[in-house]
Amino acid sequence: MFTEFEFTDYEAHWSKGELVFHYAAFSQNRDKVIRFQEKLILPSTDFVLNPKEFDLDEMLKCLHLVIGASYYKFYCTKVISIPSYALSEKQARFWNTVYEKGLGEYFYKNNIDYRDLIFFPFSDNYSPNNPQQYNHLSGSLISVGGGKDSLLSIELIRKSDEPIALLYSHVLHEESVKAANLPSFKITRELDQKVFDKEFLKTVYNGHIPITGIFSCMSVLFCILYGKKYSIFSNERSSDYGNIDYLGSEINHQWSKSFEFENLLRAYIKEYISPDVEYFSLLRPLYEIEIIRRFVTFKQYLPIFKSCNRNYKLNSTSPIGWCGECPKCAFVFSLMCAFMPVAEVSSIFNKNLFEDGQLIGLFRELLGLEEAKPFECVGRPEEVQMALYYVFKRNDFRTSPIISLFEKEILPTFNRTAIESDVFSYGDDSNIPEKFKILLKEHDA
């Protein structure tokens, strides 16, 4: 029984372009230990600054702690130790929140009582150094996930004279990056091999981690090293809506995409890392249905974008494109069909999902007819209802099982005016710099 998780230390090998993060799990008497190591491989050592001349410790601590969620989840211990550096009480509170809310789905699915569980240690005597000044930063670094959201952000910002580079992490993103035809950096994570060990995984907890939070922190480091001022994500307004209540709190699969997380991380960056890096989500004011309405006008991306998360399973040996069976596929298919003929969307997915009667249970969840929203990066039920209404009114595959479900269970009480006004409304854009707000609003045709 392992009762303590240790954030051991980290190493920065700038000349090699490697960062190494160490962790360990200990038994109660510390007579047994399992160690973990993860490497972050930088794409180039052609930095715009000399890392040894700047204090990057708070940045590296941030990465050490956020990446640690990938290993803490195996044992979920109450005791957390950090032997090699200190945190202030305010910093510890931030990490308590990131772990408690970012691991919410993991706690729920593993039936773990998270209340009074997460306590990062802090020192009353520790005062973090002042955040660093980086006067060399300019241009934008857009994080690319291979899906519609980041591709829309690229095209919105491309209309300006803003210098753009792309940041991506997976081989599946390369086709989108190539199509965008912009300079790019690749994040390479070398996870500890135990993550892939099926026998090891039988002995531990496992589950969802705040992966967008991990890549958000990595993007800040890349901005500093490669000279970019704006770390731009494409997290949508829909990500603020949770999935289910558990032990008195809302569990949100997308919490590290949410406005709450964005605000917390922005404040942490400004206070401890640098006021010169601007981290924000360009698409924050828009629901998914509005994002897709805009995205489908960029025809060059329709054959190549991929949003199905089954492509990103750790042990996946080859990409599958669209599985046509998961909540993400059903959600994106539905919203695209709101603005394109069903047959055309079906050719992209290699399947008409509306004709698959085995997906009725999944669509019931997406439409809000069941208690919980699927644990996936999908939007609100109102968005799916609106999309299927448009399909129904066009008389496009109206007799299919899914459109028939909509007609029977949603249409009788469907208030088009209210829902349309809601899902196409423009939300809080307070974190978006003015020059980017203009681009976002100009495309609102």
Image (cartoon, rainbow, N blue to C red):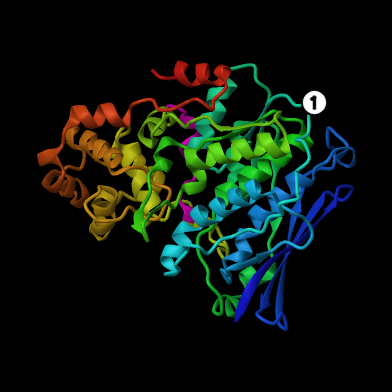
Question: In the rendered view, does 177 fall on the left or right side of 241?
Answer: right
Q: Amino acid at mark 1?
A: His
Between residues 343 and 187, which one lies in front from this camera angle? 187
User: Which residue occupies 54% across, 25% down?
Assistant: 432
Between residues 235 and 433, which one lies in front from this camera angle? 433
| Magenta-colored stretch includes residue 305 | yes
| Boundaries of the magenta span | 297-309
User: Which residue occupies 20% across, 43% down?
Assistant: 397
Q: Position of residue 119 (x, y in %)?
A: 59, 60
Does residue 229 show up? Answer: yes
Question: In the rendered view, does 311 fall on the left or right side of 367?
Answer: right
- Secondary element at image label 1: loop
Between residues 281 and 291, which one lies in front from this camera angle? 281
| Magenta-colored stretch includes residue 413 | no
Q: Quadrant of residue 185?
A: top right
Q: Which residue has dot 1 on it?
A: 136
